[in-house]
Amino acid sequence: LTTVPPGIDAERFHPTDDIHAAIDTDREAILVLSRLDPRKGIDKAIRAFARLNRPDAELVIAGTGRLEQSLRDLAERLEVSESVRFVGFVEDEELPTLYSSVDLFVLPSEYEGFGIVFMEAMACGTPVIGTDVGGVPTAIDDGKTGYLVPKGGTEKLADQAGEILSEPMEHGRLSRSSIEWADLHGWENIAKQITKIYIDHNLHNK
């Protein structure tokens, strides 16, 4: 049994110099992009952000869903509401610019079948942090293109985010590795992998 991961549209998702209108360039930006539902663990992102204690940073939450008000209430209780911004739905054509405009992408999901958003962010040169669940370890090369943290581990998530944001050399290393990894997982290369599997299988059975 051979597994080939989904690919990424590398022609569409790549670093850009444009700044998305939702991003304040005077602050460090941590992005969450997801439906606002329990499985995505966005409350963990807010709790980790509150632990981070970086006055010049903000958490940008893009997406809509039934948990928006409860997440706003959580940010208020944790006294970070002024630094947590809900920007709502983002059009698909705006995503490469949004990913490129932020310093870090996080999504502490309770479960993910794969996590294509990690690959999209990485293709735009943005380091990522995800939880070590489901298919996320297939999308994130831990320590090379980003980091995996335990499910529910808000302290570890905060520590890892702080390390990436505080160390420009580490951020640059992750950014370069992410772009290289995404290029290798463009749909053309994925198609070549699948073709090779079929060819090797047919040769083996002749």
Image (cartoon, rainbow, N blue to C red):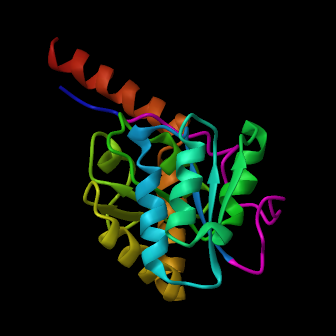
Question: 139 left or right of 128?
Answer: left
In magenta stretch: residue 6? yes
Question: Residue 156 falls in which quadrant of the image?
Answer: bottom left
In magenta stretch: residue 86? no
User: Measured from the top left, where is residue 152 in percent x and y?
Assistant: 29, 56
Question: 144 left or right of 83?
Answer: left
Q: Main secondary structure of the magenta part?
A: loop
* Residue for point 61% across, 71% down: 103
Q: Vertically, is 204 above or below 149?
A: above
User: Measured from the top left, where is residue 203 in percent x and y?
Assistant: 22, 19
Relative depth, front residue between 43 and 203: 43
Q: Is residue 105 visible?
A: no
Q: Which residues are magenta?
A: 5-27
* Residue for point 76% across, 38% down: 91
Q: Vertically, is 66 above or below 185?
A: above
Question: 175 left or right of 205?
Answer: right
Q: Vertically, is 205 above or below 45?
A: above
Relative depth, front residue between 18 and 154: 154
User: Measured from the top left, where is residue 151 in percent x and y?
Assistant: 27, 54
* Residue for point 45% across, 81% down: 162
Q: Residue furthest top?
A: 206
**Picture mark count:** 0
